[in-house]
Image: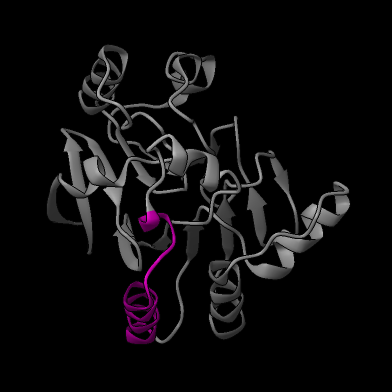
Amino acid sequence: MIYVTGDMHGAEDRLYGKEWRKLKAGDILIVCGDFGYIWNGGRFEKEAVEYLGSRKFTVCFVDGTHENFDKINACRETYWKGGMVHRIHGNLLHLMRGQIFSIDGTSIFTFGGGESTDKDIRAEQGLYWKEELPTPREMAEGAAKLDEVGCEVDYIITHEPPKRVKSAMLLRGGEVDRLNKLNGYFEEIEAGCSFKKWYFGAMHEDRAVTPIHTCVFNKIIPLGE
């Protein structure tokens, strides 16, 4: 079974909560960005990575904005279920941008990244990586992968949502509209592709925003729900 959840931000309580008890051997959990357990190399972080990598189920994540891209990109690249990943440790994988994975007959397009609102503060602290925003090459590769399958996949999993979805969520919450080039890129993908559902985590809500756009955060839900 394939499940999805939202930003974990390296939180200890997310690893041992009751939601994790539903995961069985052979299951796959995909985290929609801001995984957060690969950050400063501390003791808890090392224990968390070893714990997650040794589960009988597989934990995968697309990158968000609060990630240590130096550490992630230093991990071994390998081919997994039709797409490229960084193998962090054992059954813990980073799903690279612009890939299409085929899992149990289900096709999933993944594309991490975003733009952090606190990047100026983090840059001063040495905790900001410019790699959080995708390059033109990465976006072109993602578009090419979709073209190869006739712009049709079952599911799309990202950290950020498409432009109009993000704008609607921000306005609903009375927040200032803050869009980036990735939101625009996803808007173009949505307009040109056929898919069943799109999952994202950046907005920190557990809510079906539209019939085909689902924001995930604390809950672990079956893919397709």
Residue drawn where x is 22% and y is 40% of the image: 71
Farthest residue to the front: give it: 124
Q: Is residue 219 magenta?
A: no
Decide which of 196, 125 is in the foreground and name it: 125
Residue 206 is drawn in which quadrant? top right
x, y percentage for residue 34?
46, 40
Quarter of the image for residue 178 reads bottom right
Residue 34, visible in the rendered structure: no
Q: What is the magenta segment's predominant secondary structure?
A: helix
Quarter of the view holding residue 143: bottom left
- Seen at 66% across and 64% down, the residue is 179
> Relative to 89, is 62 on the left or the right?
right
- Height in image: 18 above or below 3? above
Near-viewer residue (174 or 19): 174
- Tell me where the magenta segment starts and ends, as one range: 130-149
Q: Is residue 172 left or right of residue 143?
A: right
Instruction: Please provide percent x and percent y for residue 138.
Output: 33, 72
Question: Vertically, is 184 above or below 40?
Answer: below
Quarter of the picture holding the N terminus: top left
Across and down, in percent, residue 90 comes to 15, 33
Q: Is residue 140 magenta?
A: yes
